[in-house]
Image (cartoon, helix red, strand yellow):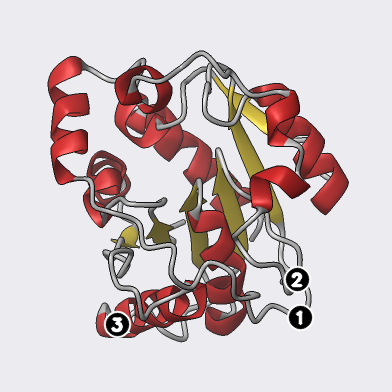
C-alpha cells in the first residue's frame, strides 16, 4: 500500500541526505518530500523549521493525506513531533535521534540526557563520527554539502505541548558513535517508554544502508495502517 514519507534531515545538513532512500521509496510507489531546513539562518529556530517542512508538504501536494509518515534523522527529532501534529501524520519514525520533551529547548539537550555517560569521547574526525560505514566518495560528498548550524535560537523552548498521539518508532544504529546505542536505548525508554529497533549501521543509515532503511520505513508504514 503506497504511503507518503516526510523526511527531515539533521543539524547542518540538507535534504540531499535522504536522496538514496527517496529513490528507493519512489521506486516502490511511495511519495516523498525532503526539504532543506533553514539551519544557517539565525532568525530561524525549530518552530520555523517545522513551518518549512509543513510548507513543503503542501507544495508537494501531500497535505490532507491520511498516509503521511514523518521521518527524522538526529537533530530532526526536535522538528518531527511538531510536523507530525500539524500534518496529522499516520506515524512518526525517529532515526538515530534526539528525542525532545514537550516545551524543551535544544540547547543543553545532551547534558539533560546525560550523553557524556555513554559517548565515545575519542572520536574527532567527522567521517569516523558520522559516516564510518558510508562509501568514501559518498561521505566526502555529504561533507561537501553540509552547512553551518545556527545556534542563535536553540535556547527557545519548542512549541510542543504533548507528544503526538500517533505510533512512534525509534531506530538505533548499532555502530553509531555519535549517539551510541546504549545512550539511545536509555533515552527512548526514559522519554517515550519505548524499546528502540536496531539497524546495523553508524549514525547515517540513509547513506550507508538506504535500501535496508527503506525496508524499515515501509514496514512501519504498513504496520501503522
Q: In the figure, is residue 58 to the left or right of 159?
A: left
3D distance between C-alphas at marks 1 and 3: 28 Å
The mark closer to the camera, 1 or 3, is 1
3D distance between C-alphas at marks 1 and 2: 5 Å
* Residue at position x 59%, y 31% in the image: 179
Contact between labelled residues 2 and 1, with CB atoms less than 8 Å apart: yes
From the image, tell me which residue sits under label 2.
Answer: 102
Residue 124 position within the rendered picture, expressed as x and y whole percent measured from the top left? 40, 20
Mark identifier at residue 161: 1
* Residue at position x 27%, y 55% in the image: 15
Mark closer to the chain start, 1 or 2: 2
Circle 3: element type: loop
Mark identifier at residue 61: 3
Residue 78 position within the rendered picture, expressed as x and y whole percent measured from the top left? 57, 62
Residue 218 position within the rendered picture, expressed as x and y whole percent measured from the top left? 48, 45
Q: In the figure, is residue 34 to the left or right of 109?
A: left
Residue 55 position within the rendered picture, expressed as x and y whole percent measured from the top left? 34, 84
Q: Are there few (<14), some (14-19), or many (20+) residues within 10 Å of tag 1?
A: few
Q: Quadrant of the C terminus?
A: bottom right
Q: Is residue 141 above or below residue 53?
A: above
Mark closer to the chain start, 1 or 3: 3
Residue 152: name its quadrant.
Answer: bottom left
Amino acid at each position: 500500500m503506497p504511503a507518503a514519507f516526510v523526511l527531515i534531515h539533521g543539524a547542518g545538513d540538507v535534504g540531499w541526505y535522504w536522496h538514496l532512500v527517496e529513490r528507493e521509496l519512489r521506486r516502490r510507489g511511495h511519495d516523498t518530500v525532503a526539504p532543506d531546513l533553514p539551519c544557517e539562518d539565525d532568525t530561524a529556530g525549530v518552530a520555523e523549521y517545522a513551518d518549512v517542512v509543513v510548507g513543503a508538504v503542501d507544495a508537494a501536494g501531500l497535505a490532507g493525506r491520511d498516509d503521511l509518515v514523518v521521518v527524522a534523522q538526529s537533530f530532526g527529532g526536535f522538528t518531527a513531533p511538531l510536523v507530525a501534529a500539524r500534518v496529522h501524520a499516520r506515524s512518526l519514525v525517529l532515526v538515530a535521534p534526539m528525542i525532545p520533551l514537550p516545551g524543551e529547548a535544544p540547547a543543553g539537550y545532551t547534558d539533560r540526557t546525560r550523553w557524556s555517560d555513554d559517548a565515545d569521547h575519542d572520536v574527532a574526525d567527522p567521517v569516523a563520527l558520522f559516516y564510518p560505514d558510508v562509501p568514501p566518495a559518498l561521505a566526502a560528498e555529504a561533507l561537501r554539502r553540509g552547512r553551518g548550524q545556527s545556534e542563535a535560537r536553540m535556547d527557545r523552548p519548542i512549541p510542543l505541548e504533548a507528544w503526538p498521539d500517533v505510533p512512534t518508532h525509534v531506530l538505533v544504529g548499532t555502530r553509531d558513535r555519535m549517539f551510541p546505542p546504549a545512550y539511545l536505548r536509555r533515552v527512548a525508554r526514559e522519554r517515550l517508554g519505548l524499546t528502540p529497533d536496531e539497524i546495523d549501521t553508524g549514525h547515517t543509515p540513509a547513506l550507508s544502508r538506504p535500501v535496508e532503511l527503506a525496508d524499515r520505513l515501509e514496514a512501519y508504514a504498513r504496520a501503522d495502517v
